[in-house]
């Protein structure tokens, strides 16, 4: 299986507007070398150029480091720069631009950058530096005829790790058993294979007497301690076979540091009796299973989230210290920043807070209105309760129409609450 290539580009240069065209060309060339299609590579190059110009305008001469990496199914440009935190709100995809405001006009390109790429994340380093990750996902052709057909007698009795060919067969089986609701990694064989090659997807399969995949299960790592199970899928929907796959997954994960698995996108033969069901997202229940001793953790909470966390921890017998989330030191920043993840197949938008702001309620509502106008109707918000300031966002989320639904233990730096929007504008 092809291994991820080393970084295609690594540069540190002074932020000088006159060099912006070189930055764009270099990033686009590197992205093309990482097998990104030319149009997506050009958009990534333009996005990096827009960020570079903004930094050169606000902090001329400051350092600007660029790395472009091949992640198999996606290409990532990581940028390290010096940018005031007060300027980061311009990365919000719903940020309005007032043409009469000189600051807004300077940031117009920054706003464009956030809309040119598939995903944007922002992190602040202890020394005040900013790390921006801009990602483009490869384009994959939709598959033609599914692999395999009637299940033949005989075959494997023990699940085996899936190689590239088995991943393709498993993707075909997922599409047959899930239909339009197929989990995103399996919408195309090559996407699933690339995700597996990057280490972002793992799978176990059982083959029939003809060597075709007759059953399988997959998982992705939500965090180093929490895995999400996809499936299992079985050609004849035999629950006993599904239970064998679940047990094999638990065995594969023991000793890896994973303490728990959860399942939202379940196959028709999902063995519910093997799991605890501790919440629902929309019409789908979330099932949990302990893999190894949890070891405890600390959660930050406000009066809205504390009771919800406590009930969940008691139900799963999780050892947690729950502390009052601290109030901000001094005045709360005026403007926040949200990350957006969009799954158009599932009609879902997931929002995550990157920077706190007094405008958080209005910011959330702008995002909901924007994407509801595009026809999306499943809105989620995730708060990481290992991050002190995120532990006090409960009142803001309730005012924005979101309600806590389920906890993902170790889903981030700490436990993550998934909130759902109960009503839409209009």
Image: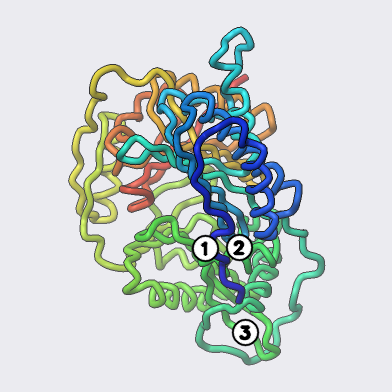
- Residues 78 and 72: in front is 78
Mark 3 crowdedness (10 Å alpha carbons): few <14, some 14-19, many ≥20: many
Q: Earlier in the sequence, mark 3 or mark 1?
A: 1
The residue indicated by pointer 2 is 72
Separation of residues labelled 3 and 2 (CA atoms): 26 Å
In the structure shown, which secondary structural element does the residue marked by tag 3 occupy?
A: strand
Q: In this orientation, does residue 53 appear?
A: yes
Identify the residue at horizontal 44%, vertical 56% (top origin).
222
Q: CA distance from mark 2 to mark 1?
A: 10 Å
Residue farthest along the top direction in this orientation: 100
Specify whether 380 is left or right of 399. right
Circles 3 and 2: CB distance less than 8 Å? no
Q: Are marks 2 and 1 in contact (CB under 8 Å)?
A: yes
Question: Which numbered mark, 3 or 2, is in the foreground of this view?
Answer: 2
Residue topped by disc 1: 200
Classify mark 1: residues with Cα within 10 Å, few (<14), some (14-19) or many (20+).
some
Tag of residue 207: 3
Secondary element at tag 1: loop
Q: Residue at x 51, y 67 (%)?
A: 199
Q: Is residue 4 above or below residue 426?
A: below
Q: Is residue 153 positioned above or below 15 on the image?
A: below
Return the residue found at the far right. Answer: 144
Residue 126 lies, with reference to residue 101, above or below; the image says below
Could you tell me if the residues under marks 3 and 1 are in contact, i.e. CB atoms within 8 Å? Answer: no
Q: Position of residue 246 (x, y in %)?
A: 46, 72
- Of marks 2 and 1, the one in the foreground: 2
Residue at screen point 32% across, 20% down: 332
For the residues labelled 3 and 1, the Cα–Cα distance comes to: 23 Å
């Amino acid at each position: 299986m092809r291994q991820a290539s080393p970084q295609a580009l690594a540069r540190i240069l002074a932020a000088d507007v006159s060099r912006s065209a070189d930055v764009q060309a270099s990033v686009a060339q590197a992205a093309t070398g990482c097998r990104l299609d030319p149009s997506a590579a050009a958009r990534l190059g333009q996005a990096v150029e827009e960020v570079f110009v903004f930094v050169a305008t606000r902090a001329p001469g400051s350092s600007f480091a660029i790395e472009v990496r091949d992640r198999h199914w996606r290409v990532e440009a990581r940028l390290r720069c010096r940018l005031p935190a007060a300027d980061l709100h311009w990365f919000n995809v719903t940020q309005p631009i007032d043409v009469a405001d000189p600051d807004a006009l300077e940031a117009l390109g920054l706003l464009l950058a956030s809309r040119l790429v598939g995903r944007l994340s922002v992190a602040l380093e202890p020394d005040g530096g900013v790390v921006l990750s801009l990602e483009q996902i490869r384009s994959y052709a939709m598959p033609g005829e599914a692999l395999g057909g009637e299940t033949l007698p005989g075959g494997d009795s023990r699940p085996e790790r899936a190689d590239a060919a088995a991943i393709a067969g498993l993707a075909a089986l997922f599409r047959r058993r899930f239909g339009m609701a197929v989990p995103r990694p399996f919408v195309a064989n090559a996407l699933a294979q690339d995700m597996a090659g990057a280490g972002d997807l793992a799978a176990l399969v059982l083959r029939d007497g003809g060597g075709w995949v007759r059953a399988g299960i997959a998982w992705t790592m939500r965090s180093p301690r929490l895995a999400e199970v996809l499936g299992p899928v079985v050609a004849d929907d035999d629950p006993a076979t599904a239970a064998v796959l679940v047990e094999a997954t638990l065995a594969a994960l023991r000793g890896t540091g994973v303490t728990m698995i959860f399942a939202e996108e379940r196959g028709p033969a999902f063995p519910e009796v093997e799991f605890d069901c501790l919440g629902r997202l929309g019409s789908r229940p979330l099932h949990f299973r302990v893999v190894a001793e949890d070891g405890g953790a600390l959660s930050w909470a406000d009066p809205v989230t504390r009771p919800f966390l406590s009930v969940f921890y008691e139900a799963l017998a999780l050892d947690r210290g729950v502390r009052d989330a601290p109030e901000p030191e001094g005045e709360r920043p005026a403007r926040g920043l949200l990350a957006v993840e969009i799954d158009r197949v599932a009609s879902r938008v997931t929002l995550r807070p990157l920077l706190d702001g007094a405008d958080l309620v209005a910011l959330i509502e702008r995002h909901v209105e924007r994407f509801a106008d595009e026809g999306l109707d499943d809105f989620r918000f995730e708060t990481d309760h290992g991050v002190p300031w995120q532990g006090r966002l409960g009142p803001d989320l309730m005012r924005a129409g979101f309600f806590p639904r389920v906890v993902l233990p170790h889903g981030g730096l700490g436990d993550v609450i998934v909130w759902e929007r109960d009503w839409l504008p209009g």
